[in-house]
């Protein structure tokens, strides 16, 4: 069994990245790329299950919690790692017994809400029109609406977290040249901050008016005139 000290290996990784980065600047070539991935983590704090891992892998009896990381994204199995507490040591999950593997096979992450769909059908209008999970679909639809308005390409990755201490939003892996701000369409009511107005006099029907700006204008019809056509009775 190979034991890894997490804090020691983290420092080594950072030093390696800094050295490579310095070399990259000298030759004007980027030799590395830092990314982030989402992996399943099984948190074990049940005393009976913790004891099972202690007995199977000959761990310290002082351990009271274990976190198993599915690094391969193929289910918890051989080749993954686990972290023990309170010592915060990391171990390779090598050749688990049939008993332990059977327990790990029952672990599966279930999100309270998730949406998976193809780009061509995952429009905001489609999501917001769903009759089930309306709140969750509305959140996804509103996000896609803002994304499509300000970003004109496909690839992008997003991570969001919020709790009682605050929120964190990260976006990466996108084409920066296609990220351009576009103001949202106006609400139906006139905001108090608007102090100047344009006047449009419509004098003929079937008139198409095209705005010459990338922003949105308010249109108020304050007067309407109609003509009446009388048909003679037969």
Image (cartoon, helix red, strand yellow):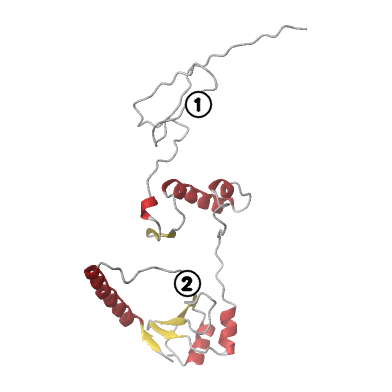
The one of 4 and 42 positioned closer to us in this rendering: 4
- Residue underneath mark 2: 39
Q: Is residue 44 left or right of residue 199?
A: right
Q: Looking at the picture, does residue 182 appear above or below residue 9?
A: above
Classify mark 1: helix, strand or loop.
loop
CA–CA distance in space, label 1 to label 2: 53 Å
The one of 172 and 31 positioned closer to us in this rendering: 31
Picture quarter containing residue 63?
bottom left
Classify mark 2: helix, strand or loop.
loop
Circle 1: is it few (<14), some (14-19), or many (20+) Cα within 10 Å? few
Q: Residue at 59% x, 77% y: name it.
A: 106
The one of 26 and 146 positioned closer to us in this rendering: 26
Q: Looking at the picture, does residue 210 appear above or below residue 84?
A: above
Circle 2: is it few (<14), some (14-19), or many (20+) Cα within 10 Å? few
Q: Looking at the picture, does residue 233 appear above or below residue 34?
A: above
Q: Looking at the picture, does residue 133 appear above or below residue 85?
A: above
Q: Residue at 45% x, 29% y: name it.
A: 210
The one of 27 and 211 positioned closer to us in this rendering: 27
Picture quarter containing residue 165?
bottom left
| Residue 161: image location, x then y, percent | 42, 60
| Residue 207: image location, x then y, percent | 51, 23
Proximity of marks 1 and 2: CB atoms separated by less than 8 Å: no
Q: Residue at 26% x, 77% y: name it.
A: 15
Picture quarter containing residue 201?
top left
| Residue 196: image location, x then y, percent | 34, 26
Which one is closest to the eye, mark 1 or mark 2? 1
Q: Is residue 6 left or right of residue 111?
A: left
- Residue underneath mark 1: 208
| Residue 28: image location, x then y, percent | 25, 67
């Amino acid at each position: 069994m190979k034991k890894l000290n997490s804090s020691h290996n983290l420092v080594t990784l950072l030093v390696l990245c800094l050295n490579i980065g310095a070399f990259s600047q000298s030759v004007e070539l980027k030799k590395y790329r830092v990314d982030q991935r989402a992996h399943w983590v099984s948190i074990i704090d049940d005393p009976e299950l913790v004891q099972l891992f202690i007995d199977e892998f000959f761990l310290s009896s002082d351990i009271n919690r274990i976190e198993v990381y599915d690094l391969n994204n193929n289910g918890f199995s051989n080749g993954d790692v686990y972290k023990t507490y309170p010592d915060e040591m990391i171990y390779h999950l090598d050749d688990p017994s049939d008993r332990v593997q059977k327990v790990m096979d029952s672990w599966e992450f279930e999100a309270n809400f998730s949406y998976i769909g193809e780009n061509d059908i995952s429009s905001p209008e489609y999501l917001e029109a769903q009759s089930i999970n309306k709140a969750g679909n509305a959140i996804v639809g509103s996000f896609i609406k803002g994304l499509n308005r300000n970003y004109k390409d496909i690839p992008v990755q997003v991570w969001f977290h919020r709790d009682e201490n605050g929120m964190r939003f990260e976006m990466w892996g996108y084409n920066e040249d296609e990220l351009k701000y576009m103001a949202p369409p106006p609400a139906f009511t006139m905001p108090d901050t608007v102090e100047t107005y344009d006047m449009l006099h419509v004098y003929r029907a079937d008139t198409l008016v095209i705005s010459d700006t990338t922003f949105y204008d308010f249109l108020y019809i304050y007067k309407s005139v109609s003509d009446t056509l009388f048909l003679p009775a037969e």
